Amino acid sequence: MSNSKAQQIVAEARRNKEEREKGYREQALKLYPWICGRCTREFDLKNLRELTVHHVDHNHDNNPSDGSNWELLCVYCHDNEHQRFEEQIRHGGKSVSEAKSGGGTFNPFADLKSLMQNK
């Protein structure tokens, strides 16, 4: 394959990726408030470029229109999430779904109903 043909293929792939990202990003920004899902930083038109769409299952081709595979994260939290995922893959451990659902077991509100009834 010639060098110019390879460059053409790469350029087309990048354009397609940008178009796909633009589509789900615009949808996500309409569905969700402009707040980072991790650090709760708020965004407006001036800094909206720093708010990214994270794919919960890490599959960038899984883009349901209901937004169920997306969360809005600031660039810092998004980078951190991907770093954690890379380390999990590299060092083994739980699967992505187990890691997401395997959070803490303590529930500070477990007995709230009975506490409220005693008042």
Image (tube, rainbow, N blue to C red):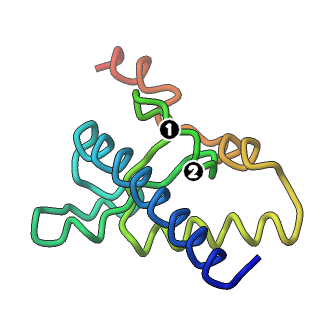
Residue drawn at (12%, 62%) of the image = 44
Residue placed at 45% from the left, 69% from the top? 77
The disc placed on residue 5 is: none
Query: Which residue, given by chain and number where applicable, does mark 2 sit on?
Result: 60
Q: Residue at x 67, y 85 (%)?
A: 3
Do callouts 2 and 1 mark residues in contact (Cβ within 8 Å)? Answer: yes
Based on the displayed image, in which of its 4 quarters is residue 30 positioned?
A: top left
Label 1 secondary element: loop
Q: Where does the image place residue 103, in percent across and percent down from the top left?
A: 66, 47
Question: Mark 1 is on which residue type?
Answer: Asn
Point out the image quarter for the C terminus.
top left
Horizontally, is 49 left or right of 96 in the view?
left
User: Can you say whether 14 is above or below 69 in the image?
Assistant: below
Task: Return the residue found at the far right.
Answer: 92
The residue to which callout 1 is attached is 63
Name the spot of residue 117 as percent of width and height, x first. Answer: 34, 14
